[in-house]
């Protein structure tokens, strides 16, 4: 018998076949139960400086230089939100910038 997955936010088990709720990224797959999903995204997402939408946790981001390194300006890594030039790329983790990669061109 398969063990049901546990929610990465609250630790409770739930039936993935019934809900099929998970947060996906190119780095990892999180299983977040339906009861926790909205709160998880609200708590750990970041605002996009270009479209004012939300950047999901565990996503690649465009990182713009600013005067306060503790509060980086972030944007989605899409053509609409990330114009070419003067941008670093990074990884927005669980509510914080986990790493920044300088001198990388995104195609």
Image: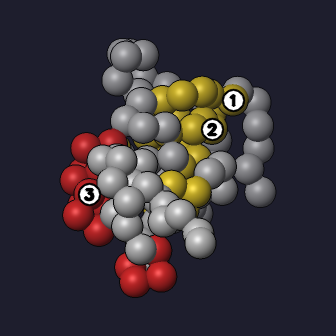
In terms of sequence position, does the residue under pointer 1 or pointer 2 come before the other? 2
The residue carrying mark 1 is: 101
Give the number of the mark in front: 2 or 3: 3
Q: Position of residue 47 (x, y in %)?
A: 31, 47
Q: Do the CB atoms of the residues marked 1 and 2 lie less than 8 Å apart?
A: yes
Residue drawn at x 62%, y 51% is 28
Q: Nearer the viewer, residue 69 or 56?
A: 56
Q: CA distance from mark 1 to mark 2?
A: 5 Å
Q: Which mark is residue 89?
A: 2
- Near mark 1 (Cα within 10 A), the count class, few <14, some 14-19 or many ≥20, is few
Q: How is the image coloured?
A: secondary structure
Q: Nearer the viewer, residue 88 or 1?
A: 1
Q: Which mark is residue 34?
A: none
Q: Nearer the viewer, residue 83 or 41?
A: 41
Q: Position of residue 68 (x, y in %)?
A: 36, 16
The residue carrying mark 3 is: 36
**Residue 55 in view of the camera:** no
Q: Secondary structure at mark 3?
A: helix
């Amino acid at each position: 018998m398969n063990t049901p997955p546990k929610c990465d936010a609250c630790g409770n088990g739930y039936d993935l076949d019934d809900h099929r709720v998970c947060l996906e990224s190119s780095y990892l797959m999180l299983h977040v139960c339906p009861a926790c999903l909205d709160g998880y995204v609200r708590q750990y997402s970041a605002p996009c400086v270009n479209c004012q939408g939300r950047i999901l946790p565990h996503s690649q981001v465009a990182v713009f230089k600013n005067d306060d390194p503790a509060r980086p300006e972030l944007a989605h890594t899409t053509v609409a939100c990330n114009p070419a030039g003067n941008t670093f790329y990074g990884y927005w983790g669980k509510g914080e910038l986990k790493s920044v990669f300088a001198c990388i061109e995104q195609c």
